[in-house]
Image: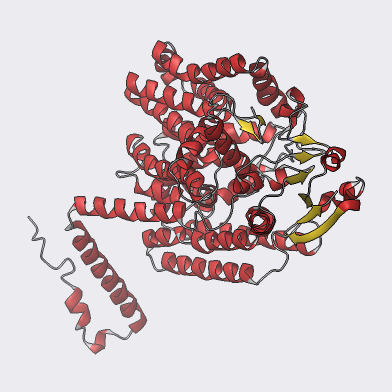
Amino acid sequence: MQDPHADPWPWRNGLMTEPLALMNDSSHVVRNRQKFDHDFWALRLRRQAAAIDPRAIDLLGYFGLIAIALWTCLYGLGSYGILNGNESLYVESAREMAQSKEWAVPTLNGLPYLEKPPLFVWLVAAAASLGGSVELPPRLVTAVAALCLILGIVRSSVVLKIGQRGFTAGFILATSLGIDVMSRVAMPDLTLAALFSFGCFNYLAALQTRSVSRVRLAAGLLGAASLIKGALALMLFGLIAIAYYALEPARRDDMRKSARDPAAVLLFFLPLCLWLIAIEAALPGAAAHVIVEEHILRFLGMREPHDYYSGSPLYYVPRLFLFFFPWAGVLLFGWLAAARQAADARQTRRFLWLCVWIPFGFFTLSSAKANYYILLCIPAMALLTADYLPGLLRERRRFPLVMAVVAPILLFVAIWAYRLWQIRSGRAAAVTLMPDGSGPQAIALLAMLSLAVVALILAGWRRPAMLCLGGLLMPVSLQFDHLVARAEPFMSARTIAAYIQDRDRNVPVYIFEDFEALGALPIYLKQTIPVIDSKSNDLAFGRRIRPHHPNFVTADKVLASGNEAVVVVMQDRLKDYAGTALPKVSTELTTIGRAKLFRIKP
């Protein structure tokens, strides 16, 4: 047996003591010497790494991944106010639910709001009951969901035999831009992505292991996901299962057996059905509204009001890239490398690709689009990237790996430059009115880090290069937080609420026409706010069934009350405001962001 302590290169000393007469072709000898030296030290490093206890490596990996995940999900969580629009409506709905104790029918500004089932609102209400600032508890719900998703993807990777420990998939997910951004806002999409993804992954594991308990776990997770955004999760999973059934004949018997399990069927359908029964009992006609308008007409682009937007067939292509930055190139070139190799793990990869392309295709064909819908694709993409990465690292040529880093950076910079051109040409509105130069600095730092990653690849340090690739997220993430913090007066009503509480605490407050643009104001004032001449899309359903609710008022009614009041008007509504009788008795107080405050003295 070979002595493990013996010199693996016995001729190395000979090379180092060659006679000068043999060094006429000095360049050839120097190159060989450099190669042997490199191999010698590389082997020594591998031996030292192999001597480390594997349990210590596992422990170090878990601590490192948890530290990265905590930074991704928790850094700056409460550093800016609740954002008007999507985030504010869930937080306000949770505040009203906790106050009214009405758990079945969510409300918004005191009116029924049935666009989504209430599971996420329940979680936000529970978090808010623990106390703390206005911003932190609601966002902790999303942050915890992100942490569960990152750590859970590690377990899913091991179960699906993608890597021995699963750290790669967890690291890729934790350093993806979509997870970083969406984990810091109180919106249900990341919670939905966690439940939906784990439901799909456990179903695949159940087919591979023929485990009834995993089938039921998958069904329960998908049933819970249906209480986030309705039947969307059930429908997408159904499409994935149908496509997999068609593509994998060897799995058909197992899939039929899982579909005949009564417990799994109940766990899959029962949660949403129970909620529909509850809201129908509390509000007759509510179940039909949810099924027809929110699940059918919405995605056909026929629901009124049209408070969503559509886009071109390529709408989600750049968004999918941005949400999976900086790993999109690794996934693409890893897939290309795997296409030239033997098709191992074909069934697992096929299912995971369906988990990407089915949601992507559905949202692309849908007439209701939003940037964050594509988040459902990201966990499966992380697993696929972790699966392809070893093959890409074993490639003899360095070009594919270099391109996997360089191509996304160049595309990201091109998208940023295009956005900057749109703003300067007036085709898009700036997030803040006064640029401070932080954008070019972030891009410059991103470019320098990417060059460092490329240098590591060219030096042969491919795995450390992939660790540094995840670090490219840092300047982008910090820039995002910086922009949101600077733009807070334009994106949140926290500053407006503070102004009102300091100067007009006991004066009635009204919002003119546009509730959504000032949706965070009721949260900070801790009360529902009447809307003058409402044109709110989010309150349209409530107005239809309760047209005489006291939170719907007219300008004439405000004047007739004879009370002094404060009216908050968005600048794009000033023309409508001038058409009422209110300007005759109002005085402008201040401008905060894109809103003007007026004091009314009838």
Kindly tell me whether residue 415 is visible in this rendering. no
Which residue is at the front of the view, 74 or 428? 74
Residue 501 occupies quadrant: bottom right
Residue 63 lies left or right of residue 350; in this view the side is: left
Rendering coords of residue 523 (x, y %): 60, 45
Rendering coords of residue 263 (x, y %): 39, 14
Residue 87 occupies quadrant: top right
Question: Residue 438, relative to residue 481: is it above or below?
Answer: below
Q: Name the residue rendered at 20%, 57% in the picture.
A: 50
Kindly tell me whether residue 249 is visible in this rendering. yes
Rendering coords of residue 595 (x, y %): 76, 55
Question: Residue 125, relative to residue 460: is it above or below?
Answer: above
By what rule are the colours in the image chosen?
secondary structure
Q: Name the residue rendered at 55%, 17% in the picture.
A: 278
Rendering coords of residue 368 (x, y %): 70, 34
Q: Name the residue rendered at 37%, 58% in the picture.
A: 463
Residue 496 lies left or right of residue 553; in this view the side is: left
Which residue is at the front of the view, 344 or 467? 467
Quadrant where the N terminus is found in the figure = bottom left
Which residue is at the front of the view, 169 or 66? 66
